[in-house]
Amino acid sequence: MDYLFSYDNWEWLWTGNNFKFLLEGLAVNLQIALIAIVFSLIFGLMLALMRISNSRWASVPAGLWVDVWRNLPLIFIILYLALAVPGSWRDAYATAIPDWLPDALQDELVLGALLGLVLYNSAVLCEIMRSGIQSLDRGQREAAASLGLTYFQQMRFVVLPQGLRRMVPSTVSQLITLNKDTTLISIIAIQEVVGAGSTLASVNFGVEVRPAYLQVFIVIGLLFIAVNLSLSRLSRRLEIRERERTGTTVKPVEGLEDQVALQTDVLPPR
Amino acid sequence: MTEGLDLLTENFRDFASGLWVTLRIVGVAFVVAMVVGTIVAAFRVAPSKALQRIGGIYVETFRNIPLLVLLLILFIGVRRAGLPISAWVAGPLGLGLYTAAYIAEALRSGVFAVGKGQIEAALSLGLTYPRTMRRIVIPQAFRTVIPVLGSLIIAMVKNSAIVGASLLALPDLLKQARVIQAETAQTEAFLWAAVGYLLITVTVTVAFRQLETRYAVRR
């Protein structure tokens, strides 16, 4: 306790550029998370549409693909891709990435990390979206079909808006998990916030105030808690506003299969 | 392909010991998570506002901190602070405390799903509050959350790989695969580790489907 709260062990935080250095590391995580979120949502929706498709040629391969990727540890996928992504792809990535994008993305190692994050999270999001769509009453689709809407129109105007809205809470909690998981790329030596913290604590820059490991990691943890809490609060507020605007109340999803996909946010909070 | 098979047969002991270490990490972490998770869930539904708040802070903290950072705090941080904690303590403990937040949330929603009427009925029959919890609410809450528990165990299996891959470096399945890959320069080592992970997750899925059909409350 003395160690944890002693002034000497916290002095690094407001000395020099230490804190700024940490924040710059966090910015790398957030940028990578943002890009991975965009691609995971797009591919997740595509996979979900394939899985619910009437054609076996689409639904079976999509199901297998999703079941494999979402059942493997993300860090496993990232470490594998760090070895398996061919050098030519990385070179192509390094030349293709425009200069105006932030430095964090210029590192060629980022390609494997992004691929891993998207492969894993698109599979998980696919299952969330699929259970949202399938939890919708069949009648909705049938009514839309009997009104003469094409398959595309049924999806676009009837099924997806309702099915996906139901899944907003579990989608957001998965995206927060994705944000936390960006710290894993420190294991393949991409310089982000955990790497920055380790550098701070281990390297002596000739400054007399050297941060202590415990305190550095606690600060990093608090930064993540702050970011993720504000994200979930924001999404909840948006959701409530949206619900008031459209005048809809979201019915809790039923069925055990859906509860699994929904994980913990499944049952109505009182 | 035969080369890949040879890799498995020649290094079978290492793969098997990695699998065993993964299972041990998950086993210990599961016990920690269930115990702490149940206590936190009890705090969350307790009649006292202060206890609810403490439970809430626990859940929000451990759900929003990256597991890797939590493990580094528990292992590297605590060691630097002078307490020689071993990786075998820090790893499962960190994983358990992290998962406990999710289990607490699942149990809490399970408790609320039981319905106020039953609690009121039990109380009006003269049962004390702890007794109502133990006899009426918790048995039903556990049954409603069986499927969620299954997916949390699978998440724990996957998260256990972080324990092996980070500085804690316990020789779990992923770590063994990396060592074998480094020695033989064959990326098939990862393929066999993937088979190992899928074996565990598929087993858990099937086992929990059985449990569900037996015990789960259908509504």
Image: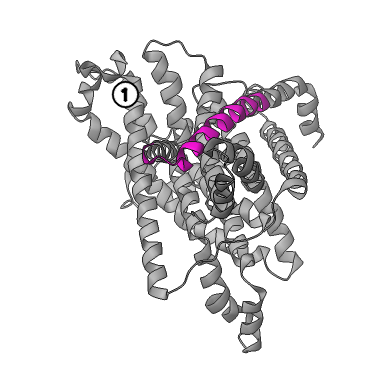
Depth check: give the residue in front, B135 or A69: B135
Task: Specify the quadrant of the image occupied by residue A257.
Answer: bottom right
Residue B69 lies, with reference to residue B44, above or below; the image says: above
Q: Is residue B55 visible?
A: yes
Is residue B28 magenta-colored?
yes
Q: Which residue is mark 1?
A: A215
Is residue B207 magenta-colored?
no
Where is residue A28 shown, x and y percent of the image?
A: 35, 42
Where is residue B27 shown, x and y percent of the image?
A: 65, 27
Amino acid carrying mark 1 in the image = Gln
Q: Is residue A186 left or right of residue B157?
A: left
Where is residue A97 shown, x and y percent of the image?
A: 40, 51
Q: Is residue A71 visible?
A: no
Q: Residue at x 68, y 36 (%)?
A: B197
Depth check: give the residue in front, B26 or B111: B111
Q: Residue at x 46, y 31 (%)?
A: B68
Which corner quadrant holds the N terminus of chain A? top left
Chain letter for the residue marked with disc 1 in the picture: A
Which region is colored magenta?
A: B22-50
Q: Residue at x 49, y 22 (%)?
A: B167
Q: Residue at x 29, y 34 (%)?
A: A22
Q: Is residue A218 left or right of residue A151?
A: left
Secondary structure category for the residue under label 1: helix
Residue A249 lies, with reference to residue B85, above or below; the image says: below
Q: Name the chief secondary structure element in magenta.
A: helix
